Image (tube, rainbow, N blue to C red):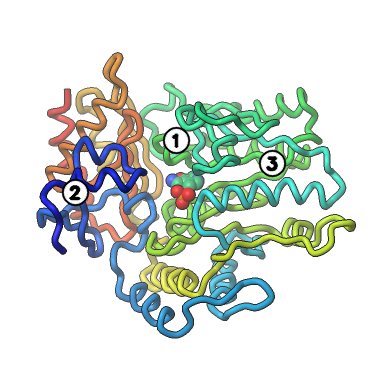
Amino acid sequence: PKVPNDLSAFWMPFTANRQFKKAPRMFVGAKDMHYTTADGREVLDGTAGLWCCNAGHCRPKITEAIQKQAAELDYAPAFQMGHPRAFELASALRDIAPEGMEHVFFTNSGSESVETALKIALAYHRARGEGHRTRLVGREKGYHGVNFGGISVGGITNNKRMFPSLPNVTHIPATHLKENAFSRGQPEHGADLADELERQAAIYGGETIAACIVEPVAGSAGVILPPKGYLERLRAICDRHGILLIFDEVITGFGRMGAPFAAQRFGVMPDLITCAKGLTSGVIPMGAVLATSAIHDAFMEGPEHVIEFFHGYTYSGTPIAAAAGLATLETYKEEGLFERALEMEEYWGDAVHSLADHPHVIDVRNLGLIGAIELEPIAGEPTKRAFSAFLDAYEKGILIRTTGDIIAMSPPLIIEKAHIDQLVGTLSDVLKRVH
Ligand code: PMP
């Protein structure tokens, strides 16, 4: 494709992309583990796009399924009628979901999944006659998308500053502790941070809290892993007070943790799971909320006085998105990609931790096929060190992601050992020169 020389011309009409103007970078193609840049270079994708292209790029099976579906049945309303692909995808999701997650609500993004799950949680208690449960608890540093509910329960302070929060939202502390630095896998310290939920239940009354939402592994805040026993403790506190536990698995879902969902990896069963991204390997906007039967039934039936309760989007489970989702799940299964993520975990962990001794590195974290290198921020210039590493890495042919002064990596699950060597080898060169 022809691309104008002055890429900054693209700045004006596309308002989402702030850093583009500072350093324009444009992708024009992709295949498997690589992107092709506008100037014809190959860049190794160390981030699966935005944590989403878990099956790799432009996989023929997924592309062909989309083309075939688009030619056969482009759209069908999901209200009063249906179409087979959505039902097939819902069943395929149920097959890989943690036991007891029997129902699927389709959405179009991670943000929509979060809003939907929060709404279901509030409505569930109301339908059961527990209308006083209006509180929501999130976690500091949590990222749950860009809409009102998600920003409110989220804990990325920059995102919250410009908006009033939903009322009755509180937060429990993040589990990012200095004493956990350089842990392999789940860290040892901090399970007791979950007890803040118990404390809040004592202050506000456990019976006023509708739900607690956490990312099992906080991705966007820079890969913050749950300390051993932490999620179990949250589960127990929720059970004690009838609080619904929501796992936001938009990043951790679909194999990233070496299991279909983090819930299975950690052996902790939430009441609701939100997902998106890897559901269609990033190809088509689609998300889902998985729910137990008890929650689904209460939500859909509603309280007695509400006639014909309604929930759904125009684009809930459209034929093309559902076809993409089905082809994606088949690809994961045929290629054993969730198991592969687990098999590669040790090699990946060794590689990422080999960067621990580089200058300015103050923490290294890993689990499944996710990793983070945390750099000491330059005083008064936060994000500068990691962002300069990102730019240098990009010039050297690898795509990483930075959030604050943390370098995050989440490669497609098809990654080979040679790719890991290239990714970490290049990053090593970059980190040696970072100042
Ligand atoms: N929740 C989590 C945990 C996420 O990581 C993200 C996206 N990074 C979202 C929600 C929002 O998803 P989307 O960008 O698709 O709206």
- What secondary structure is found at the residue carrying circle 2? helix
Q: Amino acid at mark 3?
A: Ala
Mark 2 — residue? Answer: 421
Mark 3 — residue? Answer: 211
Residue toward you, 103 or 81: 81
- What secondary structure is found at the residue carrying circle 3? strand
**Residue 37 position within the rendered picture, expressed as x and y whole percent measured from the top left:** 16, 54
Q: Is mark 3 within 8 Å of ligand 1?
A: no
Q: Nearer the viewer, mark 1 or mark 3?
A: 3
Cα distance, mark 2 to mark 3? 42 Å
Residue occupying image coordinates x 60% and y 57%: 289
Residue occupying image coordinates x 52% and y 48%: 111
Which is more N-terminal, label 3 or label 1? Answer: 3
Q: Amino acid at mark 1?
A: Ile
Quadrant occupied by the N terminus: bottom left
Q: Amino acid at mark 2?
A: Asp
Q: Is residue 381 above or below residue 119?
A: above
Residue occupying image coordinates x 58% and y 48%: 114
Mark seen at residue 224? 1
Residue toward you, 53 or 312: 312
Which is more N-terminal, label 1 or label 2? Answer: 1
**Residue 160 position within the rendered picture, expressed as x and y whole percent measured from the top left:** 51, 30
**Residue 45 position within the rendered picture, expressed as x and y whole percent measured from the top left:** 25, 52
Q: Is residue 394 above or below residue 1?
A: above
- What secondary structure is found at the residue carrying circle 1? loop
Quadrant occupied by the C terminus: top left
